[in-house]
Amino acid sequence: MLFEFLQHSYLIGIVLALLVLSILGQIIIGILYQKMIQETDNMAMTENKILKKCKLKFSNCYELNEGSVNIPVFVDKFMNQMKFAGMRVTNMTHVSGQLLLLSIFAAGVGACIGIINGAELTELLPYYIVSLFGLYLYFSISSLVDVKGKKYMVRTNLIDYLENHLVKRLQLVKEEEMQQFLVDRAGISAENGAEEKETREMTENKIETDRKPENGTEGQSAGENPAERAAEMAERKRTEGQAAGMVERKRAEGQAAGTEERKSAREQTEGEGDELETLLREFFA
């Protein structure tokens, strides 16, 4: 039997290599989910890069959608996009299954080549033994690792943390930010009001300061030159008297002209009446 294995060592080696890779894929995925399960018990202090990325993405999504987030859908999308060594975890599961199928296919190819070459049953047994042993080992380890169960546990823990812990924390942070914004806004308004009041008072003080020297200068000028001020007042009164006299003369001249016009009009009217009376007398005579 050992001789038969050594005789077909190259094909048996390919089959075993594919089986080992497929089993390693299942083990790696199981370890990854197991670590995530342990970290989700203390999500607030976790150092797991994948979980920290999940919290960050959820916080950004929560702020962008203003608190309206479908958490189960978000968790499902995140878990489907998780990557390990540059490959998505869901694709690693599929690749592991494909490697198992390739190992079975390689064993079948070796058996077919032996049949074509006229090999006996004892020469074909190694391929069947490796195939059956590989299938048993793969499914045994897959059941022990329980990738689906671990994935479900990770999903449940993430939904629980996001709904019952992180959402409430984000709500508190948002309320604190709103309160701080209102306080800052009220402080800015008060500062602006104080600045406006101070500016108004400074303007009023400046106006009063500008007025005081002018009033003082006028008083000083009046006190220093009383004779000039008296002469100015006398000249002003004399000018006003002359203007009043001229107005009276014009008024008297106007009255005289009106009297003469009325007199001439009356004389003209009387002359016309005498002429009319003369014509009437001549007519009736």
Image: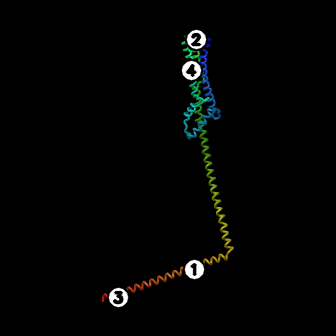
Measure the alpha-carbon separation of dots 3 and 1: 55 Å
Give the quarter of the image for residue 165: top right
Q: Give the residue drawn at x 64%, y 60%.
A: 203
Q: In x, y percent, where is residue 83?
A: 60, 30
Q: In x, y percent, where is residue 41?
A: 63, 31
Measure the alpha-carbon separation of dots 4 and 3: 160 Å
Q: Is residue 207 above or below residue 177?
A: below
Q: In this view, does 256 lie to the left or right of 91?
A: left
Instruction: Report if the CB atoms under discs 1 and 4 are less than 8 Å apart.
Output: no
Name the residue carrying label 3. 278
Which mark identifies residue 242? Answer: 1
Q: Nearer the viewer, residue 161 or 13?
A: 13
Instruction: Report if the CB atoms under discs 3 and 1 are less than 8 Å apart.
Output: no
Q: Which residue lies furthest to the front in this view?
A: 117
- The mark nearer the N terminus, 3 or 2, is 2
Q: In x, y percent, where is residue 52?
A: 62, 34
Q: Is mark 4 on a helix, strand or loop?
A: helix
Instruction: Report if the CB atoms under discs 4 and 3 are less than 8 Å apart.
Output: no
Q: Give the residue drawn at x 62%, y 53%.
A: 192
Instruction: Report if the CB atoms under discs 3 and 2 are less than 8 Å apart.
Output: no
Q: In this view, does 200 lie above or below 277?
A: above
Mark 2 is on which residue type? Answer: Glu
